[in-house]
Image (cartoon, helix red, strand yellow):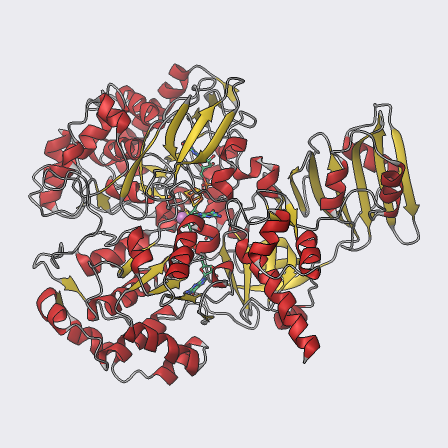
Amino acid sequence: MSVKTTCPYCGVGCGVVASKDADGSVRVEGDGQHPANFGRLCSKGSALAETIGLEGRLLEPMIGGTPVHWDDALDRVASGFSRIIREHGPDAVAFYVSGQLLTEDYYVINKLAKGFVGTANIDTNSRLCMASSVAGHKRAFGSDTVPGCYEDLEQADLLVLVGSNAAWCHPILHQRMLAAKEKNPACRIVVIDPRRTATCEGADLHLPLRSGSDSVLFNGLFAFLAGSNAVDRDFVGSSTTGVVDALKQVAGQTVAQTAATCGLTEGAVGLFFDWFTRTERVVTLYSQGVNQSSSGADKVNAIINCHLLTGRIGRPGMGPFSLTGQPNAMGGREVGGLANQLAAHMELENPAHRDLVQRFWRAPVMADKGGLKAVDMFDAIADKRIKAVWIISTNPVVSLPDADRVRAALDACELVVVSDCVRDTDTTRHAHVLLPALAWGEKDGTVTNSERRISRQRPFLAAPGEARADWRIICDVAHRMGYSGFDYADVADVFREHAALSGYENNGQRDFDISALSTLDGRAYDALAPVQWPVTPDHPAGTARMFESRTFFTPNGKARFVPVMPRPAGNATSRDYPLVLNTGRVRDQWHTMTRTGKTARLMSHIFEPYAEFHPEDARVAGVQNEGLTRLTSPWGEMIARVVVSAEQRRGCVFVPMHWNEEFAGAGRVNALVNPVVDPVSGQPESKHTPVKADPYAPKWHAFILSRSPIRRPDTGYWVHGKAGDCWRLELCGDARPESWRDWARAQLGLEQVEIEWVAYRDPAAGRFRYAAVRDGRLEGCVFIAPDHTLPSRSWLTGLFAEQQLSANARMSLLAGRPFGAGEDTGPIVCSCFSVGRHQITAEIGKGADSVEAIGRRLKAGTNCGGCRPEISKLVGARAQSRQAIAS
Ligand SMILES: Nc1nc2c(c(=O)[nH]1)N[C@H]1C(S)=C(S)[C@@H](COP(=O)(O)OP(=O)(O)OC[C@H]3O[C@@H](n4cnc5c(=O)[nH]c(N)nc54)[C@H](O)[C@@H]3O)O[C@H]1N2
Ligand SMILES: Nc1nc2c(c(=O)[nH]1)N[C@H]1C(S)=C(S)[C@@H](COP(=O)(O)OP(=O)(O)OC[C@H]3O[C@@H](n4cnc5c(=O)[nH]c(N)nc54)[C@H](O)[C@@H]3O)O[C@H]1N2
Ligand code: SF4
Ligand SMILES: [Mo]
């Protein structure tokens, strides 16, 4: 049996085919016919089959940690919410939801809150993600419209990526861009990011601008364009308003000034401006380096201004392009999931829209003012203005800024309901009621990707345990609260209503219109092929590109220039907090790791939370590569592994957002992140927090590898996860046990078991190595040292695959390095074929001089291709050092 569905991770929205073999095992492959990926998948998509096991799943409803019947759980939620609404009014409750819900789930929760409870206190993690783009679009176009499509990226002659690490975060789209560039030698790629990321491999120009200075850069470009012949006077004159004011704002801004403020060379800025001016087909792609800023919406408009001035919008190969993060970031916007939106791209604050939606829903009350946005919502929970919150499909204790405060808020809240598919997360720990949701592979509905393409997620697995679809859980609660209007026969029924609302009294006034899909019967809904909205009776096959007619959704039909006055970041660095903390993603993890953290393959690329420093900043802070650092901000602190790299901009330190208390002690970066938000969009500034870094030097460091899960310490720095065929725990401490041997044995949980100990002790040096062998097979090993220089984990992990440890392997365990036993592959670069860095450098040493040559010799980079930038970097580094030797 095979089923076509859509990848549940990023906004590229790749189609996948899931097949079940006779033995019940599942294979997941790229869907060759899906227009987003044409069969390709990245490392995360390729590993989907490894993440669908039931280990760690939440499979029963629970109240206070005890399993209960669904009826009891639903009654508790409904009666708790109803009572608080009765006693304190509708604004005393809140819903915090997610761009990972399916459109149908999202539609009903939004309907429940805004039309039946009568509160707009429903916000979503899209506030942390896309809110600035939404605000920017609305200011410029009068609607939240992404104008272009993926084919535009292939037809462009200049691709500008701003604050986007697409090589790691939108890998398949990035590969499409690189493939197009290969075919079109005229095509250039510019990357604008304070860090030199994997996306810079394959780019023609990298502008490592000062953190937060994008508005200055694009204002500079705007001024430069104004003085060139790239201005499209017809378009500006007939299809836009506000150009004079916007130009006034940038009048006189020179390339030299721009470069100085952005911390760039004049030459590099001039080159970028020159390319932009002279290239008609230019797409500017942007993501969280733009959105997650206290001036995110302004950055978006500074970019759009440049496209409006040149008329480069609504035509093939050009336009501003907001890359969406989550699989259904767009679907959430379509149903009005944000606290300031109404369903079907309507405005909450617009009385005509409210009236229309109220009539369509036959809603008893309508929220009539914007609700609390994510950060404010958790503040209101903290000070008890909100007394009940229902969190669905998001993990705010990890992902919101000032996350310790978020945790405290939930602890203080009268009623916390969490719907998730995973039992233990940093957020589920604080729930009074836990509701088990269906996960990817089980659930059924639709998602919309970055290019407005609606695709089906179809189930291929049976619902496990008691888990239910989110939309059904929400409707069941709505019923119990006494609301009618939630009697859907099935998920297709919800979709039809959503589609019908989009066309209701629309008459071409609203961009989001999928009314042609409002009559799909069950079978047609099941078979729905990927299609780009609008899908109307006039355009039944969908719409690739918007604004082709050069009219916009503002009252006068004209696009608006927005004057942008650059502002500094919300919190400046100081003597006490001299570094800018920048946060973001790594290639193989998805957000809070609840799914990608389940597979050893995806854990092998980067195992520990890390802080990446420029060499000069590392020297000043006194931290060492591979050592540990304590990072502190005015809001909180964390501990991370140090990476020293010239790819960091001086003054910035980068930390991934993923690690949390399920995987690490003291590894939650959002404990430090300032809760400052953009005043226009309410989006938090996740990329700019002033911090200081100190060396963290505990008295001992250790790691443990074990065939069975290892008990995690309660305090201090530790990291836990799967590694190859075993589990791995990194830890450290100050207090020494009386006997390291007993300690090691206890850590492995082998006190009561007959085993053979292989031990090496050097008490004077503080080095101890223990290995437990049973029936000739390695059960576990524990390595302790006074500093962070411990043996290679990737090599040791490999020894667990051996059924009988050789004499050499035993010797190696004692010596702490391979003696012809196993291979030290080094940290894994290619997670598809488990190829490590040492293997790649060895082949480069033997003459492999390109990514392709490495692929031929080791297969690395030949499946998903996500590691190709890293291989390219290793090849490049070698070539550079050869040159240096030769000269
Ligand atoms: N592997 C992986 N892929 C993902 C996700 C994931 O968790 N893992 N999540 C998905 C989601 S929800 C999202 S939103 C997207 C995010 O996708 P991206 O936005 O591409 O990812 P980030 O790493 O958050 O940030 C992008 C870059 O912004 C840069 N940056 C920081 N400050 C500035 C600045 O002031 N100006 C500029 N120009 N750049 C700056 C950072 O250095 C970083 O390299 O990824 C999606 N894809
Ligand atoms: N410092 C910093 N913080 C950030 C960011 C950053 O760049 N830096 N990025 C921000 C961005 S862009 C985003 S999108 C957020 C993401 O942050 P979160 O949304 O908090 O992260 P996830 O791990 O994706 O959380 C999804 C949760 O929903 C569960 N889940 C998955 N599928 C389903 C389902 O079908 N139903 C239900 N009920 N539950 C499900 C998962 O198990 C998981 O617990 O993080 C934001 N926070
Ligand atoms: S690029 Fe990767 S994570 Fe994103 S949708 Fe495609 S396969 Fe999934
Ligand atoms: Mo996101």
Question: Which image quarter: residue 844?
Answer: bottom right
Residue 127, percent from left and from top: 35, 49
Q: Is residue 566 visible?
A: no
In the rendered view, tell whether residue 253 sits above or below residue 722: below
Relative to 257, is 875 on the left or the right? Answer: right
Q: How many marks are shown on the rendered structure?
A: 0
Give the residue drawn at x 15%, y 27%.
Answer: 519
Give the residue drawn at x 90%, y 39%.
Answer: 759
Q: Quadrant of the C terminus?
A: bottom right
Relative to 166, is 130 on the left or the right? Answer: left
Residue 220, percent from left and from top: 32, 77
- Decide which of 410, 471 is in the foreground and name it: 471
In the rendered view, tell whether residue 873 sits above or below residue 213: above
Relative to 178, is 361 on the left or the right? Answer: left
Give the residue drawn at x 32%, y 23%.
Answer: 472
In the rendered view, tell whether residue 672 sits above or below residue 305: above
Q: Quadrant of ligand 2?
A: top left
Residue 593, percent from left and from top: 53, 40
Residue 716, percent from left and from top: 68, 47
- Decide which of 118, 771 is in the foreground and name it: 771
Question: Which image quarter: residue 618?
Answer: bottom right
In the rendered view, tell whether residue 524 sits above or below residue 336: above
Give the residue drawn at x 82%, y 42%.
Answer: 821
